Amino acid sequence: MSSRSQPSDRNIFKMPCGKCMVSQQCLGYDPHTGDSCILDDNTGQHMLMHRGEYLYRAGEPFQALYIIRSGMIKTYFISEDGEEQILGFHLPGEIIGFDGIADGELPSNAMALDTSSVCRLCFDSLEKHHHHSAHLQNALLKGMSREILRHENMLMLLGKKKADQRLASFLLNRSVYQSDHGYSATTFTLAMTRTDMGKYLGLTVETVSRVLSRMQLQKVIAVQTNQIRILDLQALQALAGDHLGKKSQTMEPAATATGVGAISRRARTAISATTGKSLPSYLH
């Protein structure tokens, strides 16, 4: 198998949803009954991916949404001048593929940065189910809302002039994600390269390395290859400025929000404009 290939059929398998670590973030999870999958067997496929494999490529027909179960997926597109523009580094519990709904074609690429597993949810089947499930409708809309908020907050992050602020905010986002999902908030692995970090944050790889080294000298963090250990959380927050004093929004925006109120008026308007479909009246 080519290191740049898509997952082969032998890497597509069935796994009980009840054994999934992110089942409660799944579109099929019903919080009222605790049922880990309200979808039928034709809706979802579990896929195992290795580093460098593509989940999908720009230009392919939109057919599914993908929930990341483990690992990390990078999404990106190639600009008109041939530069790679990274859209995000997606972690377990996040849903990707929403950007293909509007035009029926995927505008970006999705590639595994390490061994990852995803759940592929056929969008046609999701549409059939969502007409009969208020919960599924709401889950889809909240997923779209989180994508909008993630991109808005990324624009805010890139608006910061100082490289130290951008990188500190990036590390704090990951720290909050870790804490929210029951992992260590101070020790974690970054699967992406320094080059990818730079592309995502609008910095050169030399600047990324220089800022990380400076943070180490200041005893704010410790770095060993791709392992990060936060030594002084308050100092890291101070470096980030006001971007992340309270809650992560770039990695995992509104991840714990529940109920229809979690969907902002602006997000509802944007979702309707993007999909060309009006939202159900009870979601307004």
Image (cartoon, rainbow, N blue to C red):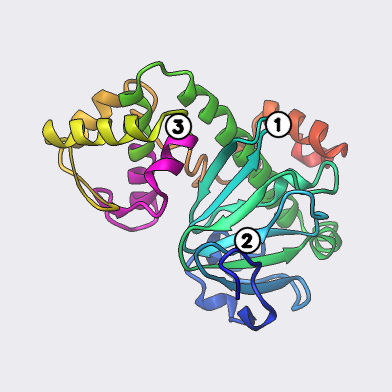
The residue located at (69%, 46%) in the rendering is: 108
> The residue under label 1 is which amino acid type?
Glu
**Outermost residue to the top:** 161
In magenta, the rendered stretch is 172-199
> The residue under label 2 is which amino acid type?
Tyr
Q: In what element is the residue under mark 1?
A: loop
Which quarter of the figure has residue 240? top left
Is 196 colored magenta in this rendering? yes
Judging by the rendered image, the residue that carries numbered circle 3 is 201
3D distance between C-alphas at marks 3 and 2? 22 Å
Judging by the rendered image, the residue that carries numbered circle 1 is 80
Residue 193 position (above or below residue 47): above
Judging by the rendered image, the residue that carries numbered circle 2 is 54
3D distance between C-alphas at marks 1 and 2? 21 Å
N-terminal of the two: label 3 or label 2?
Answer: 2
Which quarter of the figure has residue 196? top left
Badge 2: how crowded within 10 Å, few (<14), some, or many (20+)? Answer: many
The residue located at (61%, 44%) in the rendering is: 76
Residue 115 place in picture, x, y as percent:
47, 68
Badge 3: how crowded within 10 Å, few (<14), some, or many (20+)? Answer: many
